Amino acid sequence: MKTDNVDFSVITVCYNAASTISETIESVLQQTDICFEYIIMDGCSTDDTVELLNNVTDPRVKFISEKDNGLYDAMNKAISLASGKYIAIINADDIYVDEFVLSSVKQEFERSLADIVSGHLYYFDTDFSKKARRYRCSPLSNRAKWGLGWQPPHPSTYVKKEVYDSIGLYCPSYKISADYEFLLRALFVNKYKHSVIDQDLVAMRLGGESTAGVKSIYLGNKEVLDAWKRNGKKAPFYLVFIKLFNKLFSGGLL
């Protein structure tokens, strides 16, 4: 594949994902009207994931299995290898809703001249048979919305590679909220342009690190407060309460 005309570098990080990753791969490889590469970073899985990935013959797929220091460290490695103009990150147990997701996002980048584009996502149960709730992303009409708990959903957010090159990658010391810190740094601190495409883009299984229960919610909110401090900002005292309400009840309606 020529690297000078790659639109998207799609990235999946996985560990022991044999039960779900085939659906993810299928949803990526069916994307049409778009030039992309697919980088899969495996953290030395001990189930059948590696065998499964070794059997993927599509030339657009680059598969690497090696030790990492966690989810965001693996993401950073993959981004460093990426040759696409835009970065798309999809979890190993999530899927794109149809074959036109990436082409629609590219059109929105070109239409809006944005640096970061987001869309909506659905949370599903583990076999995608029942919708749990919808995460509808609203535009960043003003930066004050960050203090009200606003953030774009990371699985349906797409970033120009040059943004990572300019402001850096994810903070690997965070277990849950490195995506929040990166987007805070990009959109709130550095004021990159954000646009929202009014479409459902990703179906996300419940049960990931950020949806796995009270312990993960506590740790995630602790990291959110630290993210503001890391960027030289003071978080509003009510931010954690608003984010907790959104997590438990509203499904991200801000």
Image: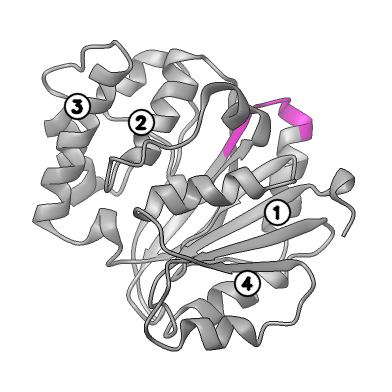
- Is residue 115 within the magenta segment? yes
Give the amino acid type for the residue marked by disc 2 in the picture.
Glu
* Residue behind mark 1: 102
* Residue behind mark 3: 225
Q: Position of residue 164 (x, y in %)?
A: 57, 31
Which numbered disc flags the more N-terminal residue, 4 or 3?
A: 4
Q: 128 left or right of 64?
A: left
* Residue behind mark 2: 181
* Residue behind mark 4: 27
- Is residue 98 within the magenta segment? no
Determine the CA span between mark 4 and mark 1: 11 Å
Q: Are the two marked residues, 4 and 3, in contact with CB atoms closer than 8 angstroms?
A: no
Q: Residues within 10 Å of mark 4 (few under 14, many from 20)?
A: some
Q: How many marks?
A: 4
Q: Position of residue 220 (x, y in %)?
A: 20, 43
Name the disc covering residue 73, or none: none
Q: Quadrant of the N terminus?
A: bottom right
Q: Are the two marked residues, 4 and 1, in contact with CB atoms closer than 8 angstroms?
A: no
Which numbered disc flags the more N-terminal residue, 4 or 2?
A: 4
Which numbered disc flags the more N-terminal residue, 3 or 1?
A: 1
Q: Nearer the viewer, residue 142 or 60?
A: 60
Q: Position of residue 189 (x, y in %)?
A: 43, 14
Q: Report which quarter residue 27 is drawn in.
A: bottom right
For mark 3, give the secondary structure: helix
First to last magenta residue range: 110-117
